[in-house]
Image: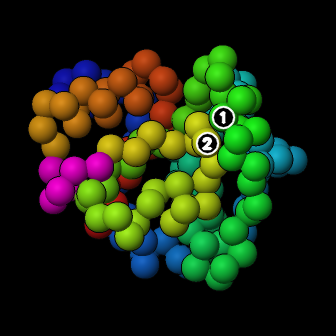
Amino acid sequence: MKTLLRSSALVLALLVTGCAPAVAQQMGDRDLTAPLTAETQAALTPMEVIQLLKDGNQRFVDGEAVERNYMEQVAQTAGGQFPMAAILGCIDSRVPHEIVFDKGVGDIFSARVAGNFVNTDILGSLEFATAAAGSKVIVVLG
């Protein structure tokens, strides 16, 4: 747990319904269909990531999700991944993280377990997401 707490990630809890009221913002001129790069990930602050997740959820709720070419994104991320967030959520198959936050391949790490609890495996995954892969935020999704 100490490793996780020493990381620069911001830990917070969000409910999908609580994310809906968001101001539409984008990361400057960044193409939302392009995977994050090391540079774009490094430039993000935890509060910007939270806003991007809220904005994506608002697009999802409004039925205005960004159209993405997932196979192209898979190819673009073959050399590395630079996710903005790690999401700990329930194993519920009705809440796919990338879809409800309108994110693409490489944008988030998803850790799913029944009951949203943290065990050694999940903790290790969240530590990797923040300390090694640079995720700025850990979301505990209810």
Q: Residue at x 22, y 36 (%)?
A: 122
What residue sits right under mark 1 in the picture? 74
Looking at the picture, which amino acid does disc 1 mark? Val
As rendered, which of 11 and 98 lies closer to the eye?
Answer: 98
Q: Quadrant of the N terminus?
A: top left
Looking at the picture, which amino acid does disc 2 mark? Val
Is residue 9 rendered to the left or right of residue 21? left
Q: Are marks 2 and 1 in contact (CB under 8 Å)?
A: yes
Q: How is the image coloured?
A: rainbow
As drawn, which residue projects farthest toward the right? 29
Is residue 29 rendered to the left or right of residue 95? right
As rendered, which of 141 and 27 lies closer to the eye?
Answer: 141
Q: What is the chief secondary structure element of the magenta stretch?
A: loop
What residue sits right under mark 2 in the picture? 105
Q: Residue at x 41, y 36 (%)?
A: 9
**Segment colored magenta:** 112-117
User: Residue 41, how many percent across, how many down?
Assistant: 64, 32
User: Residue 40, how many percent across, how many down?
Assistant: 71, 32
Question: Mark 1 packing: few (<14 Cα in 10 Å), some, or many (20+)?
Answer: some
Mark 1: secondary structure: helix
Distance CA(mark 2)–CA(mark 1): 6 Å
Mark 2: secondary structure: loop
